Image: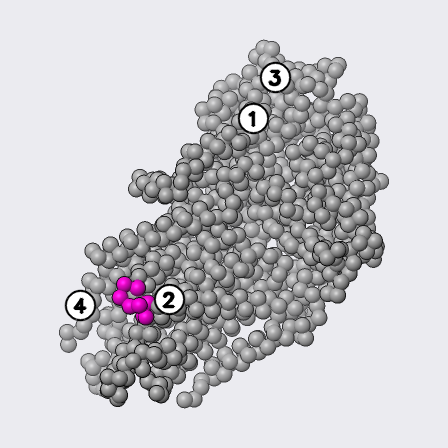
Amino acid sequence: MRRLGTGLLTLWAAVTFAFFALRLAAGDPISSLLSQGLASPEQADALRTSLGLDSPLPVQYLRFLGGLTRGELGRSLYTQRSVAATIAQQAGSTLRLAVAGLLVAAVVGLALGIAAGTFRTSLFGRTASSLAGFATAIPAALTCVLVLWAATSLAQSSPFLLPLTRSESLLLPALALGIASSGALARVIQSGLEDNFDAPYLLAARARGVQPGPRLIWHALRPVLPLAVSFLALEAALLLGGTVVTETVFARPGLGRLLVSSILIGDYPVVQGLVLLAAVVYTLTHVAADTLSAIIDPRLRPSA
Amino acid sequence: MRAAPSLWASAAWLTAIALACGLAPVLTSSSTIHPVGPPLLTPSEFPLMGTDHLGRDEWSRWLYGGRISLLASLSAAGLAVVMGTGAALLAQGIGGAADTTLVGGSSAAMAIPGLLLALLFVAIMGPGTDTLILAVGIGLAPGFARLARQALLQVRTEAYVGAAAALGAGGMEAAQRHLLPNALPRLLSLATTHYAWAFAAITTLTFLGLSGDISRPEWGSMLNAARPYLRIASWLAFFPGAAIAATILSVHTLGAWVARRRSGRWPVVSDQ
Amino acid sequence: MNLRRRFPFLACTALLLAACTPEEDASTTLNYGLTLAPTGIDPHLNASAELGIPLTSVYDTLVVQDPATGEILPGLAERWEVSADGRDYTFHLRDGVRFHDGTTFDAADVVANLDYTVNPDNHSQKAVFMLGPYELAEAVDASTVIIHLSQPFPPLLDSLAQVYLGMASPEALDAWGPAEYQFHQIGTGPYRFVEYVPYDHLTLEKNPDYAWAPQIYQQAGPYYDRIVFRFYEDPATRALALENGEVDVLGEIPPLEAERLDALPEFTLRPVAIPGQPMQFLFNTARPPTNDPEVRRALIEAVDRKAIVDTIFGEHSWVAEGPLSRNMWGYADGVSFPAYDPESAQRRLEQAGWILGDEGRRSRDGVPLSLTVVTPNWGNHPEVSQLLAAAWEAIGAEVQIETAPGFGLLKEASDQGDYSLIGINFFGTDPDLLRPMFTSSGLYNWMNVSDPALDAVLSQAATTAASQSDRQALYADAARAIRDQALILPIRDYVDLVVADNRAGGLAFSYQGWFPLLHDLHPGP
């Protein structure tokens, strides 16, 4: 419960920061509309009043908070459509990408982590460990370009692979996003496995001559899994950041591209709404992850 | 402790690239903005790295671009380290409520994912390398503050233990005065990792086209500009991409080595 | 060993993800690519050429233009008369035309459309200017409408042939209002508007009741059940979208990719020369250092425009030599801009007082020669700007490039006035499109030029000029004046590189160049 409270507090702080930060933005958005020829002086004044921009800043802030409780995020300065509707329209694509990316991250992270943790002295294990580090460290932009290059090169020699490069297809962007996010999970699993393999009951088993076969690995893995799950929840939030780059490189519509284009044209209500959404998602996943590990924590201790 | 081959490779790369970028005016006489020949020449047709889509010397752009990438990341990381360490020291010095504020404040600041925060900065201040340095520096600062705080706490605990065990009560004040110097190795390792993160962040932001000046080369924006030519001129993506990857991995390797070196090898309490 | 266990799982995941690609019914749906996502798509109000690509087929216009000659032909109006003083145009409308919502089209609808367009509250960005000295329209009876002008305006028929003055259902205009109408457009054309999701897609469907095709439509279409438009703003993604079958027709393909695709058997390259203004940069004559004509001439001479065009556009474009493109009837053949001569450029600057300093930079009285170029971020402008900057740095100027990510922001930059050059051009088929830009009171006079002679020439050509050849002579005078005063830096005539999959046949473009005649597009060669 306290976690939820701190989470809400964090959320409020983030939201407030976004609100005031955007108000500091260079230039008055309304006068920008005027000089872009998108509004007459009368319309600009009317817009300014309806948006409450002529009130003092604290009043605007309270109105903003009030609007939030009603689920109102304002209207886009350019299309006049509600920010909530604009975001909802683009959210589906990003959500699909994030889920698919999470799936790939889980699979790849699990694979690399198990390999690195189980065979930590062999070349195989060390390579896996290095790969995991590699994947996290290099920026998502590079991973995306690499995946795109590999796919288009492959598709040149095998044209039947071409449909995989379509922008509706989740395969390539999910692969890129997932690989870029898998390293952290791999690390968690690797260190968890390394610790557990040193646990007395497992050392005893190996002393008896039991090789690191699937059953042994499973025994070592089980305690780590709950931690991994909660870690994955954290990854989910990080993934949302990665979608900005992925959507750009793979030409997918979604919240990432909406954010970049809204920033470039100065559609501040939309930017505000997106920052709010990101903060909410981030906070919720953190709270969920913390709660999850707290619940599972007591059961981590082996009863043996 | 024998240093692994990867450490030598990392050190070699970082030294080489820093020297190369620093000595750029010596290594190349081409302008970075003026075409030197037909566009998209391969590295064998036009050494050392061919020409880009506007016929400019890719080698020259790679060297000068590296300067900007490396230095901007240094500034951003430096900002984060200074701000973060300062905040952590302050909180440690004042103690109590200040410490709680630090933890709470950094949590709140970290609630907005780094990339988003940087984009917010661009929204407010407009695109430009200075904006990006500020954005990345301020974005990484809360995280560094948290880690610095942890490092300081650890040292403090060790110092108290060591002091109490070896020097008696008077050693505690001495330990406190030497908190920062003892924490320095840990902080150094953290700073190294943060440099790698700053570098990744800066190159991602310039990749997204937020660096403001479209003429000036920089590894992230060069990688982005190479995208339409992935098939017909893949070297244009290879050179900046490989440089980015090599730099980040080298810095991480170095940082990991520093972290491993300092554990158990440095004195807990300094001389009187 | 574990990876072997994981592999089937991985393979299944991969297949699952691959299977998530939805299949389109290829025989009756056409996928068309657009390159710019405009902020608004109401043709009466918004100015982008991109919106015309789908919407030209949603609306019909009073008259149409022959795609090859530009000759004015009947559209919704069967015939028309122009009064002797050139101020009244009487249109006789054809019968039996229905809007997509079933209502009948009549003269009152024409009046309502024109009223909507000229209503100042609606802020039309293009259509209202195309009407020139429009006063009012009057519906004499259900099939006769008279347009009254306050003075003669020869470009009127050309304007009325374009989608920006297409006929929309007034009921829909009223019901939805200027902000929402763009998402619910109702016209009379061969394709119906279904939906528009900004940045994502725009869908049209066949209008089966279309029985009033003007003679520019040569086939018995419309053929496709649906046409789906998607956006490909990033040039790096366009060729790939054609190759993987995601889209069947896409324009503005980068030149090297266009050639590569043309060489493949399944694609055909259709270069379309676009009439109007060429890609150009306007000099700001109100701000130093470009307020000095000698500096402007020097800057023009310092640029090897041919090399720039060759590097960026390959063989598919040619250097522009005036304020109009070569395929416009107002183009002045004998007028050309100064050739590449960097020595002459340097001399001019020296003589104008800009002395070369130690670090290769010029300055005058302690003020450095500093230029700011505001460039739009579409259509290869950024690349051209970079090469311009390089050329000017070579003669001793400091150049700063600022990118404007949207037309509105370009306009805002122009308001602020902090630029030496700004990149902007308009497309169109009547040379009168020069007037808003080059007259002292013009809305797009971003050069801050104020030349009474030029004003007189351009307004005469738009009003009292007796014949097309008279107008042609006037526009030649204008081109000379623009060249002599070095008001612009012309770069290249636009050529739209359209690549079509051979699955789609009958691709033809309107006289304006950008707009495909979707009515004639059909499956198969």
Looking at the picture, do discs 2 and 3 lie on one chain? no
Residue A298 - label: 4
Residue B3 - label: none
Front: mark 1 or 2: 2
Residue B70, horizontal then vertical, whole percent: 54, 69
Q: Is residue B94 magenta?
A: yes
Looking at the picture, do discs 3 and 1 lie on one chain? yes
Looking at the picture, do discs 1 and 4 lie on one chain? no
Does residue C88 appear anywhere in the picture?
Answer: yes
Task: Identify residue type, mark 4.
Answer: Pro
Q: Disc 2 and disc 4: Cα gap in Å? A: 35 Å
Front: mark 3 or 1: 1
Task: Identify residue type, mark 3.
Answer: Ala
Q: Disc 1 and disc 2: Cα gap in Å? A: 56 Å
Front: mark 2 or 4: 2
Which of the pair C232/C445 is nearer the observer? C445
Residue B226, horizontal then vertical, whole percent: 59, 60
Mark 3 or mark 1: name the one nearer the start of the chain: 1
Q: Disc 3 and disc 1: Cα gap in Å? A: 16 Å
Q: In the image, which residues are magenta?
A: B91-98
Which of the pair C294/C218 is nearer the observer? C294
* Quarter the C terminus of chain C occupies: top right
Task: Identify residue type, mark 2.
Answer: Ala
Residue C137 - label: 3
